[in-house]
């Protein structure tokens, strides 16, 4: 430590004085941004995945609108996966005002993050739905279940176990991506650490500190992932897991 | 009695079912046999709408469905509720324990009260000698046990017929005989059974009727004794082909 940071005492002082503000920025911006965007993004992802996954009935009044929805879903996923997140944020926050659409920075960030996460996670969820064998559908159909019941009671519980690891990846990625919100004027953790650096001239110390804080948050999420994986896999080892 | 008339089904150019006309008497066990790829499974799955034939009619005394016309939701569920399928790989729901596997359909489809459904499920489990496994998950059971549970699951919705698609093909001989004994018992209790199997011993001892299908056509339909004691040339050939003696 002394080799990296020089004399430890003044550095420690800087850390101790920076930490409360950084933690505050984490609580006020980083965590809410990540949580709200993930929640909204997840809803978008589930709807998009279902639109792409389910086959419409032969009834033309269902089939035509459904296929329109499907085309829209495909376009949406294509759009947000083939452009950089940073560019998306800039377009929403700096670009839309030219069309007289003014969006506050925090809301612009939530829109950008949730649409981006929704596009990626929809593919994750779709693949989890597809991974439940057709046999499970057959077994449920023969017992008289409706498609909706089969989805909720048979397919989703099994798909949840499969979707957890990749979805956790995406959530953890989102937590770190919130640092991009600094570019659209949001005073989140990383932006604050940059500002502090410009007054105390300790870039290595400040950026290490903020990196640690991100790592701390993500470690908590990894623990949550482990717990949820255990819970959703109970049936594999007969509940002894 | 189930009556199926003029059933046709093609996958692309290949005719899988070619003008099938069959009857499955109530309260009896009908065994469907025939070479692989003959259309047995397709026919069986048609009864439960897991496969939709291109045309043809299926008739129950109180229900008639024309496969070539649109089938209303009500008709569809009436037809599905008349029968219940047991699969080669049993297809139990892996995330539910044994009791929930058996009761999930009665509770959610037939809207039976939970305690009634559970009581009924235990009766069924006693029948198959697996009462003590009620709270286990499928992954903890042997194949034969899982298949017996899946038969309970099929019976729990009180279908008129149970349909079995090679229920013992994935089991070793000891487990197979557990399942076959159970099916024989059910047959003796006048449960209507339609079953695809390659096990001729079961066909000889437990079947009432035999349906022999080849290339999507019915080659034989009638009583068991006639099939085994008085076979035509093609049946003789088939029976000799699958015998090692």
Image (cartoon, coloured by chain):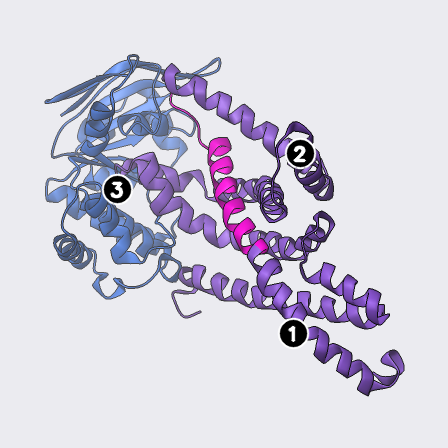
Residue to which mark 3 is pinned: B202
Q: What chain is tagged by disc 2?
A: A
Can residue B100 be seen at all in this image of the molecule? Answer: yes
Position in image of residue B53 (x %, y %): 34, 19
Chain that the image shows in purple: A
Q: Which numbered marker is on residue A20?
A: 1
Position in image of residue A181 (x %, y %): 68, 51
CB under 8 Å between discs 3 and 1: no
Secondary structure of the magenta portion, mostly? helix
Question: Which colour denotes chain B?
Answer: blue
Residue beneath the point at 19% across and 28% down: B78
Q: Secondary structure at mark 2?
A: helix
Left or right: B109, with A67 as reference point: left
Q: Which residues are magenta?
A: A33-57
Q: Which numbered marker is on residue A37?
A: none
Disc 3 to disc 2, C-alpha distance: 77 Å
């Amino acid at each position: 430590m002394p080799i990296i940071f020089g004399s430890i005492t003044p550095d420690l002082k800087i850390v101790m004085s920076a930490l409360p503000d950084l933690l505050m920025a984490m609580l006020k911006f980083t965590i809410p941004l990540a949580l709200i965007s993930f929640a909204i993004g997840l809803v978008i992802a589930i709807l998009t995945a279902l639109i792409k996954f389910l086959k419409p009935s032969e009834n033309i009044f269902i089939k035509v609108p459904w296929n329109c929805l499907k085309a829209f879903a495909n376009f949406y996923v294509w759009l947000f996966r083939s452009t950089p997140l940073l560019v998306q944020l800039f377009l929403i926050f700096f670009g839309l005002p030219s069309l007289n659409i003014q969006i506050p920075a925090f809301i612009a960030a939530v829109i950008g993050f949730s649409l981006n996460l929704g596009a990626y996670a929809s593919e994750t969820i779709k693949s989890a739905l597809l991974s439940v064998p057709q046999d499970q559908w057959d077994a449920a159909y023969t017992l008289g279940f409706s498609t909706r019941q089969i989805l909720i009671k048979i397919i989703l519980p099994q798909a949840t176990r499969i979707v957890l690891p990749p979805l956790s990846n995406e959530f953890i990625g989102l937590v770190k991506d919130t640092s991009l919100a600094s570019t659209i004027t949001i005073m989140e953790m990383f932006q604050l650490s940059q500002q502090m650096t410009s007054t105390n001239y300790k870039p290595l110390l400040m950026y290490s500190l903020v990196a640690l804080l991100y790592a701390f948050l993500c470690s908590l999420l990894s623990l949550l992932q482990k717990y949820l994986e255990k819970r959703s896999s109970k049936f594999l080892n007969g509940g002894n897991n | 009695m189930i009556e199926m008339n003029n059933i046709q089904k093609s996958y692309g150019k290949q005719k899988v079912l070619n003008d099938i006309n069959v009857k499955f008497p109530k309260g009896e066990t009908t065994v469907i046999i025939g070479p692989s790829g003959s259309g047995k499974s397709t026919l069986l799955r048609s009864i439960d709408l897991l496969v939709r034939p291109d045309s043809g009619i299926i008739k129950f005394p109180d229900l008639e469905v024309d496969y070539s016309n649109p089938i209303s939701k009500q008709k569809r569920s009436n037809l599905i509720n008349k029968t219940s399928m047991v699969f080669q790989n049993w297809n139990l729901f892996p995330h539910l324990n044994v009791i929930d596997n058996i009761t999930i359909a009665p509770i959610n489809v037939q809207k039976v009260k939970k305690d009634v459904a559970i009581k009924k499920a235990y009766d069924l489990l006693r029948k198959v000698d697996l009462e003590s496994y009620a709270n286990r998950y499928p992954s903890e059971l042997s194949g034969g046990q899982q298949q017996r549970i899946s038969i309970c699951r099929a019976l729990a919705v009180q279908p008129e017929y149970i349909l079995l698609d090679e229920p013992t093909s994935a089991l070793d001989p000891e487990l197979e005989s557990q399942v076959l004994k159970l099916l024989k018992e059910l047959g003796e209790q006048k449960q209507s059974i339609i079953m695809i199997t390659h096990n001729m011993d079961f066909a000889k001892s437990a079947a009432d009727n035999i349906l022999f299908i080849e290339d999507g056509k019915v080659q034989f339909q009638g009583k068991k004794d006639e099939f085994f004691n008085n076979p035509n040339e093609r049946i003789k050939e088939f029976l000799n082909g699958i015998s090692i003696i």
